Amino acid sequence: MRPRTGLPVVGMVGAGQLARMTHQAAISLGQSLRVLAAAADDAAALVAHDVVVGDHTRYADLAGFAAGCDVLTFDHEHVPAEHLRALVAAGHTVHPAPHALRHAQDKRVMRERLADLGLPVPRWAPVADAEDVAEFAEKAGWPVVAKAVRGGYDGRGVWVLGGTDEARPVLAAGIPLLVEELVPWRRELAAVVARSPYGQGAAWPVVETVQRDGICVEVLAPAPGLDPEVGEHAQWLALTVAEALDVVGVLAVELFETGAGLLVNELAMRPHNSGHWTIEGSRTSQFEQHLRAVLDYPLGVTTMTAPAVAMANVLAVGEPVPQGRPGAVGLDERVHHCGARWPAVKVHLYGKVPRPGRKIGHVTAVGEDPGAVRASASAAAAYLAGLAGEPG
Amino acid sequence: MRPRTGLPVVGMVGAGQLARMTHQAAISLGQSLRVLAAAADDAAALVAHDVVVGDHTRYADLAGFAAGCDVLTFDHEHVPAEHLRALVAAGHTVHPAPHALRHAQDKRVMRERLADLGLPVPRWAPVADAEDVAEFAEKAGWPVVAKAVRGGYDGRGVWVLGGTDEARPVLAAGIPLLVEELVPWRRELAAVVARSPYGQGAAWPVVETVQRDGICVEVLAPAPGLDPEVGEHAQWLALTVAEALDVVGVLAVELFETGAGLLVNELAMRPHNSGHWTIEGSRTSQFEQHLRAVLDYPLGVTTMTAPAVAMANVLAVGEPVPQGRPGAVGLDERVHHCGARWPAVKVHLYGKVPRPGRKIGHVTAVGEDPGAVRASASAAAAYLAGLAGEPG
């Protein structure tokens, strides 16, 4: 049914936390995000009104979902490219378009394209067998980093290999792989931008992303102590990639900061963990901006709301309501204590049942002092995760 | 079904824009607001996942709705008091409780109670006939203001009477009325606070509310040029009312600022139009705070995010997608233009079909200069409303 307001319907394939937070932003724009959920208890499916449960790898499910939408966009990169092309051929508006999204779906395609554009990427090579890995390592040196060409995220699909013996079991899985040099980076940065079909671009300040075991645990905005020229260069890189690849929507460019400059590590063409801080930390959140972009609305201003913002992910260590463990505290009680101890920290929970290692939410602290906001966000997230017995 | 996270379920009776924006806040807290909607296209019913359509004046509908909720709260004051008491008797947690909410449902009960507490209210009297009105006017002077004891809002249920002749048609409607002096106020203020069952209180800065034809059109935070002592007194008044009446949740106290001090005009025990600015303008929005309060979570900090915030209501003047009128611009196109002209103004649309005079949304501007934020919010709201042909 068409909204009687005449406002457009955006459909998002995938119903994880990115869709959940995009729905929050859609509500302000007078809309209600339509989501294609894999399961009825997906993070966004729990809170959106217009939920279709279906399989994003089946064309019939995608086409049925698209029928009621003015524009289709994505919570993840896992829709098969041929289905995306078929949706476009059937007349649907798809943002980012398949010819753009393939660079976020396939690391080999992305690296080839960025190299063609003359943009800085780590040394890399596609590999089919242990000999290919050894040949690359001869030039780049051991260890090398092997990456699944498709589907990896949050540390999955990434292996650090010390020698050919370690490469064999990874190669044995039979998935397309590439290898790259282990970059001696100082830290990881992310440049998050948005681009509209009209070609308008907007960039947020460049952030530092702090990883643990390959998983982002903290994001610091702006990246502390970043040379302003390096920051501008990172924004230029991201806007250049957005333009060259015809990205529509939010584009997150993960970067390595090295002694010799910046290297592009990964791309994501959707709201991204490195932009969650924008909900409170910027006048326009990445979720609102993604909607504005895919609707070809003018983009919102990206001014920060305070000098320092820190985001910390809540990576669960316990069960939701532990029973029989003296002193164990369920999630609801942790939210209570967190609110008392850190009344200025903003909590975002995704409706997910805590399981060890699962990203069940994030918290954001906004203020004047980078050290203070980082300390409170980090402590609040650890407490919500169940790491601490008492709010510190 | 209980959420598997163990987090509580809040049910809100009523599904207007207040419930819609409360749902946005609930999502961040890991929840999904359950709403009792009068119709499937109510503002919140369009965006919430857990929607029950029913009649808030029927006890069976209320009891069925309450069955799945940990706490019940309200988008409006229209639930009959006897039903609220029956829900409490049946073991449901209801915030604000009926003994508090009656003061927001019945202006006579409210004025009697505030007078008993020694708090400043306009001179007033209950009236049954024209003689009562004339008797009051002899003391207070003409004109007097007649108000429906129950159910009035946004200028409805309020009449300015120049003499007994004008009183007769109003009295003829047969609804319970009171009259009060026409207060020679300088301006109207609102003190918005929250109180938890534990007794914690939190106050936002006092705001100026600008009315036109009895309808709030703008809210300026903080109230420009307000004497700090008057501001603190207004906050004290609101916190005192919250405590004395045992309010749980957000309490908005509408005030007249006069040459002789403050007078309490009206109370609302729910998120209120005078607090919409807090979504962007305060570290904790009134919607999140209302949820924290009714859940007995610790309250969030009420610090402003910038020195000056202005909210302007979008009161529609046109139809959503005018057809055949040369130059007429539909709502979607107005949102486009608004985003281009005022990229820093935040838009909140309620999913309502524009009809002349209908409050279909609001906009908020945040910045350093009170005059500048007011000008941009006001102009953007007027443009979205359809008042202007071109974005100015």
Image (cartoon, coloured by chain):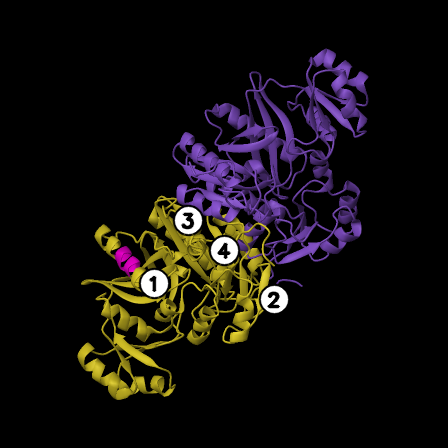
Chain colours: A yellow, B purple
Q: Are marks 1 and 4 in contact (CB under 8 Å)?
A: no
Q: Is residue B92 inside the magenta stretch?
A: no
> Looking at numbered disc 4 in the image, what kind of residue is underneath it?
His
What is the distance, in whole Å, between disc 1 and disc 2 at their CAs? 52 Å
> Which of labels 2 and 4 is toward the front?
4
Chain letter for the residue marked with disc 3 in the picture? A
Q: Earlier in the sequence, mark 1 or mark 2?
A: 1
Residue B163 image position (x, y, % from top left): 73, 15
Boundaries of the magenta span: A234-240
Count residues near mark 2 (Cα–Cα under 10 Å), then give few for <14, some for 14-19, many for 20+: few
User: Which residue bears the numbered disc 2?
Assistant: A323
User: Which residue bears the numbered disc 3?
Assistant: A284
The residue positioned 34% from the left and 50% from the top of the image is: A371
In which quadrant of the rendered image does the N terminus of chain A lie?
bottom right
The residue positioned 23% from the left and 70% from the top of the image is: A116
The residue positioned 48% from the left and 31% from the top of the image is: B222
Residue B343 image position (x, y, % from top left): 40, 44
Chain letter for the residue marked with disc 2 in the picture? A
> Looking at numbered disc 2 in the image, what kind of residue is underneath it?
Gln
The number of numbered badges drawn on the structure is 4
In which quarter of the view is residue A150 placed? bottom left
The residue positioned 39% from the left and 32% from the top of the image is: B369
> Looking at numbered disc 3 in the image, what kind of residue is underneath it?
Thr
What is the distance, in whole Å, between disc 1 and disc 4 at their CAs? 32 Å
- Residue A246 image label: 1
The secondary structure type at the circle numbered 3 is loop
Chain letter for the residue marked with disc 1 in the picture? A
User: Which residue bears the numbered disc 4?
Assistant: A348
Q: Nearer the viewer, residue A325 or B122?
A: B122
